[in-house]
Amino acid sequence: MNEHTPGPWAIDDYTRIYAVADSPFSYGAICDCSIDSAMTGEEQRANARLIAAAPELLAACEELLELLE
């Protein structure tokens, strides 16, 4: 499996997602959820929050898998 940009990830004041390292937003944007104009601003922000949670969700799934094995 390919490695992803390490977390944590954060969302700016709009819908851009950044990887947070030593200082916030140090890696540049990972994703911009405002590209799809068919979605409302709230839908774009909800998608951004879900994507920003990906590193934590992956870690939780990996811990659960270890417990199940």
Image (cartoon, grey):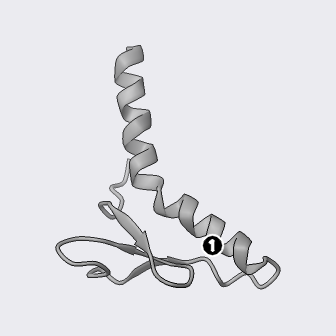
Q: Is residue 3 left or right of residue 44?
A: left
User: Residue 37 at what x, y percent from top left?
Assistant: 77, 85
User: Residue 40 at what x, y percent from top left?
Assistant: 78, 78
Residue marked by disc 1? 45
User: Residue 25 at what x, y percent from top left?
Assistant: 32, 81
As helix, strand or loop, the secondary structure at mark 1 comes to helix
| Quarter assignment of residue 59 | top left
User: Residue 43 at what x, y percent from top left?
Assistant: 72, 70
Position of the C terminus, as image quadrant, is top left
Residue at far top of view: 69
Residue at far left of view: 22
Residue at far right of view: 38
**Residue neighbourhood size for the residue with mark 1, other residues' Cα within 10 Å, grouped as few (<14), some (14–19), many (≥20):** many
Q: Is residue 18 left or right of residue 39?
A: left
Q: Residue at x 40, y 49 (%)?
A: 56
Q: Residue at x 33, y 55 (%)?
A: 3
Q: Is residue 43 left or right of residue 30?
A: right
| Quarter assignment of residue 63 | top left
- Where 1 falls versus 53 (above or below)? above
- Where 60 falls versus 34 (above or below)? above
- Where 43 falls versus 65 (above or below)? below
| Residue type of the residue flagged with mark 1 | Arg
Q: How many marks?
A: 1
- In this rendered view, identify the residue nearer to me: 47 or 62: 47
